[in-house]
Amino acid sequence: MLKSALNQLAVMVLSGGLLAACQSSPPKTEAEAVSKEAVVKTDSSATTAKSDPVPTIGSPKLLFTLDDAHNTPDGLALAPNGHLILSVPNLADNSQPASLMEIDGTTMTPYATNLPLEPTTKKAAPMDLAFGPDGNLYYAENQYENSKDFKSRLMKVAVQHGKPGAITTVVDNFALANAVVWRGNTIYVTDSQWDLPNNDKGSAILKFSLAELNKGTVHLKTKTMDPHVLATFSTTVNETGVDNGADGLDYDSKGNFYTGSFGDGRLYKVSLKPDGSLDKQETLKLSGKPIPCVDGLIIDRTTDKMYVCNSRENAIEIVDLRNGNAVTTLAQNGDTDGSGGKLDQPAEVLLKGKRLYISDFDKPEKHFVNAKSDAPHTMSVIDLP
């Protein structure tokens, strides 16, 4: 829990062999303050890899170690000022309040800590997030673990002069709102549990215009092909028992969207007509190793290489969309607690220049390489060639 107001926060993190110390501006209120333990200096040489057959590939570095009050780092957004905003839904231990944090280089400070609770679950659970063309921040909220009764939402954080203000609901009645992506004046949102009467393993991509969101809260019609539904998918449940579907979301240099299923690892391409409606959707045929689980993903539109969090196998995969959807593994390691920057169930990636930021969600399902949720709670980083 965020404990007490501090006048200053200096965070020193060892990452990639460089020691940097940064000092934040003083928080204004106790609710905005962060405990000294929230971000901890960690020796990147200390690892706790266990003996298992999973190969070790690549060398992710430690970016941050977080305290137990920030136990499931997840979504990442690039702010207009170049900072990163991190969502912390605390789903591994939701007795801790969820929050949004701001990352500036090697410094992490609170961004928004008093997130609106859903009235019936009494919880906030921010997942993926993105800044819109209006300069405001939008985040998807996952209430599915608190209620299966379509309580998830899309939230807007009003931003003025780079500072967060009022937080309001712009769309409600999602089942499990997950990823968000803005393209032009339209926001696209995945719902990993958008079930229909004839498909209880369903998921979907939904879309909303900025103009519509500005008119007031949109109320989705649950268990229907609501007019906001762009595409639907069905998950094949395997030995993990997970039926979560469409998860990460992004688009390529031609405007085609891609999402992947958390439960079965299928990757989908969704093409649009000039008016923004669905043209066609297809399952990608991958060349090389299969991907059994797709969590967060991001596409470098200068190369059309997709970086995918393979949460089940503790790996970051690259799918080359211009080269036959060839799959290569950028980084992978066995079951660790994340010390030293080792991957610990990567759930989200963000690309800034040649640096790939990774959130280690560390909340495993059955048959995942990551066997349990445990401290430390970490974020990793990979510097690309």
Image (cartoon, grey):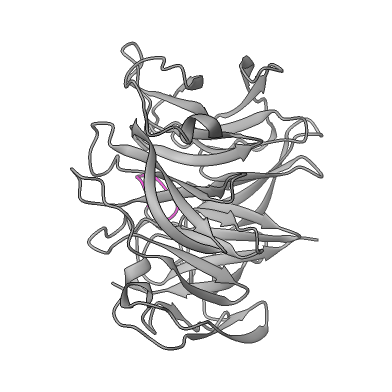
Number of marks in the rendered image: 0
Can residue 376 be found in the magenta stretch? no
Report whether 231 appears left or right of 29: right
Q: Residue at x 69, y 28 (%)?
A: 256
Q: In the rendered image of this protein, does residue 328 appear above or below residue 199?
A: below
Task: Give the dominant element type of the magenta stretch: helix, strand or loop.
Answer: loop
Can you tell which quarter of the image residue 287 is in? top right
Q: Is residue 269 left or right of residue 241?
A: right
338 relative to 192, above or below:
below
**Quadrant location of residue 17?**
bottom right
- Residue 149: x, y in percent? 23, 31
Residue drawn at x 30%, y 39% is: 144
Quarter of image, res 201: top left
- Residue closest to the eye, 15 or 345: 15
Screen quadrant of the N terminus: bottom left
The single residue placed furthest to the left in the displayed view is 120
Seen at 57% across and 79% down, the residue is 44
- The spot of residue 357 in percent (x, y) is 61, 60
Q: Which residues are magenta?
A: 364-370
x and y percentages locating residue 139 in the rendered image: 46, 47
Q: Is 366 inside the magenta-drawn segment?
A: yes
Q: Is residue 298 rendered to the left or right of residue 166?
A: right
Residue 343 makes an appearance in the image: no
In the picture, the quarter occupied by the C terminus is bottom right
Q: Is residue 109 visible?
A: yes
Q: Position of residue 131 (x, y in %)?
A: 57, 49
Q: Residue furthest top?
A: 198
Residue closer to the observer: 119 or 159: 159
